[in-house]
Amino acid sequence: MTRPQGDGLTDGERYEQGMTVRRQVLSDEHVDRATAASTKVTADFQDFITRVAWGDVWSRPGLDRRMRSVAVITSLIAHGHEEELAMHLRAARRNGLTIEEITEVILQSAIYSGVPAANTAFRIAQQVFVEEVS
């Protein structure tokens, strides 16, 4: 499978592609906050996730963003990464998933990741969706 922008992207091109996708998925506000909070300790990590996670993986044509969001939500629930879940629930909504679809993903995760993990995910989702309706 080739890259959406062609083979052999430079790090700079992957960064730019990644920043575009990252902003589309997570929002300009989120990315601006993350960038502004970057320090000497975290700057290399911010560059890495922009190039690799967003510029490489999220930019691949093999899955649409809705499917990628389902995969991310499921993985975050399974691994107990609550601090990232709210952000990716918002991203899933931006990627076109409905609240009902997200609810089904969380319910499905209860079977494979455990009821306590799904219970926590439902609590976080409820907070996110209340914010969305307000």
Image (cartoon, rainbow, N blue to C red):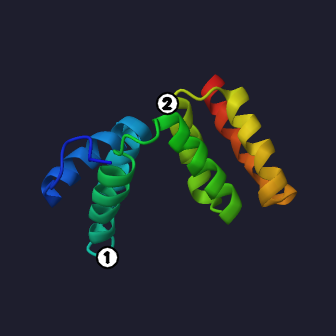
Q: Quadrant of the C terminus?
A: top right
Q: Residue at position x 80%, y 43% from top? A: 107
Residue 6 is marked as: none
Residue 30 position, x and y percent, is: 41, 45
* Nearer to the camera, 107 or 32: 107
- Which amino acid lies under the numbered mark 2 shown in the image of this protein? Arg
Of all residues, the one furthest to the bottom in this rendering is 41
Q: Nearer the viewer, mark 2 or mark 1?
A: 2
Q: Secondary structure at mark 1?
A: loop
Is 106 left, or right, of 41 in this rendering?
A: right
Q: Residue at position x 56%, y 55% from top? A: 84
Is 81 left, or right, of 20 in this rendering?
A: right
- Which amino acid lies under the numbered mark 1 shown in the image of this protein? Val
Residue 104 position, x and y percent, is: 76, 36
Q: Report whether residue 134 is seen.
A: no
Label 2 neighbour load within 10 Å: few <14, some 14-19, many 20+: some
Residue 93 position, x and y percent, is: 56, 31
Q: Residue at position x 27%, y 47% from top? A: 2
Residue 72 position, x and y percent, is: 56, 50
| 43 vs 62: above or below | below
Q: Which residue is mark 1?
A: 41
Residue 94 is marked as: 2
Q: Are marks 2 and 1 in contact (CB under 8 Å)?
A: no
